[in-house]
Each structure stands twice: as structure tokens, then as C-alpha cells.
Image (cartoon, grey):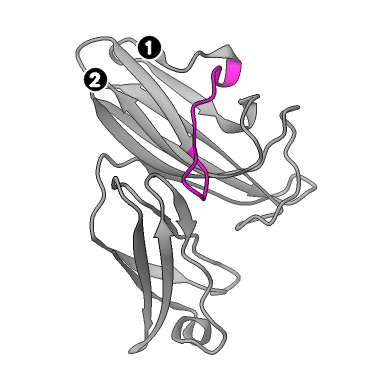
Amino acid sequence: MKKFRLALFVVLTLALAAVSANAQLGDVDNSSFTVQNVGDGQAAVLVTFYNENGVAYTPDPLNAGKPNPFTLDPGASFEVYVPGIPALADGRYSVVISSDQEIVAIANLIGQNTAGTVFYNGSYSGMSAGAESVYLPSIVYEYYNWNSLVSIQNAGSAATDVTVTYTCAGSTAVHTKTNLQPGALRSGGEPASGSALELQRVGFGRFDR
């Protein structure tokens, strides 16, 4: 069984209307992700969400009445529009996508204000495995009004502690994320006041477990 992992930021209601929350990028952040079967046979795909405490949810159906699990023919794809999932509560989630065929996944995130103005949108690809150390070459904090959104997902099978080290102009700022549950998500956290990144506004990050 092959697995892809995604970190998602979600704001939704059962009526499919976004509501205000303590979002990272805007007043309202919403996600979608697309899964494609790149294998040779029909894929059986299962989508599992994890909240920030590591509690797993397998909502059925997904959006548009799509059952979970579902099948995809070779080359076919399906977009999971997270606000359209009726049984998934508001919150931040990470996702594990399991399949018996080779799959690829790309996630999309949109941050808006309450008037619907888009502050930010971005995309990133799912991964089939994690690593004990990860480097991010460029992170910004209030740099010409730009901020980087950094999320950490535990891709292992046991809870772990994660150390986030921001480096800028030869100085460092460190955050520790403790007891990160399997599958769960944590944001990287903002630099402390007076720290290297807070003062210099641009740097890079390292994540270690």
C-alpha cells in the first residue's frame, strides 16, 4: 500500500461556507488537493485526515458525494475540495492518501479575508516518505509584508519531538515541538521577538527529530 502525505489548513462549515478563524495566511484559509493515478491498474484510494492531536478521521463521503475509499482508473484524477466534505469539522489537518497503485498528489491553499479578497495562494506536492532532517533554503518573516508558512507532519509511526532552527545573519532562533503524534501536523511557529529572523526578516530553516 503506497502512501502520500499532505499538510492542510482548513476552514469550513457543514453548510460549506468558510468562517473566520485564527488562520495563518488570512482570516479564512481553505484547502483542496488532487490525487492522480499514475499506475498501470485501477487504484483503490483512501483519504485519512489527522487533526493537530493526531486523531484520525476518514470521512465518507468526500465532496461531491465521492465515497471514501474510491477508485481511480489509470491516468484519472479527483480533486478533494476540503470545504465540501460534510462530516469534517473546522480545523487544521494533515492528510495521508493510501493507494494500491502509484499515485501523485498536489495540494492548494487559499488565504482570504472575510470579504473574500485573496491574500495568498500556493501549491505543493505530497511526499511518499519523511526524513529526520529537512532544510528550507529561504524563509521570510514580515519581509515587505510577506511571511512564510511552515508546517511539520510526523510521517513516522511513533510520537516524536521536533526542533525547528531558524538561521539568519549568523544568529539562530529555536522552537521545539514536543509529542508530535503520527500523522499529525504542527506549524513552525513565529520567531520570538528580538530573535534573528524577527530582526533580519529573512533566513533559512532546519527541522530535526
Q: Which quadrant of the view contains residue 202? A: bottom left
Q: Residues within 10 Å of mark 2 (few under 14, many from 20)?
A: many
Magenta run includes residue 91: no
Disc 1 designates what residue? 71
Residue located at (72% from left, 28% from top) = 14
- Identity of the residue furthest to the right in this view: 115
Vertical side of 109 occupied by 74: above or below: above
- For mark 2, give the secondary structure: loop
Q: Which quadrant of the view contains residue 110? A: top right
Disc 2 designates what residue? 101
Residue located at (49% from left, 64% from top) = 148
- For mark 1, give the secondary structure: strand
Name the residue nearer the viewer: 137 or 14: 14
Name the residue nearer the viewer: 12 or 154: 154
Vertical side of 128 occupied by 15: above or below: above
Vertical side of 163 occupied by 46: above or below: above
Residue located at (52% from left, 50% from top) = 52
Residue located at (51% from left, 68% from top) = 189
Quadrant containing the N terminus in the rendered view: top left
From the top left corner, tell me how far across and down residue 104 is, in percent.
31, 30
The amino acid type of the residue labelled 1 equals: Thr
The amino acid type of the residue labelled 2 equals: Gln
Magenta region, main secondary structure: loop
> What is the CA distance from the residue labelled 2 to the residue labelled 1?
10 Å
Q: Residues within 10 Å of mark 1 (few under 14, many from 20)?
A: some
Left-right relation of 151 to 63:
left
Q: Earlier in the sequence, mark 2 or mark 1?
A: 1
Label of residue 151 in the image: none
Question: What span is in magenta?
Answer: 50-64
From the top left corner, tell me how far across and down residue 199 is, in percent.
51, 87
Q: How many marks?
A: 2
From the top left corner, tell me how far across and down residue 69 is, in percent.
42, 16
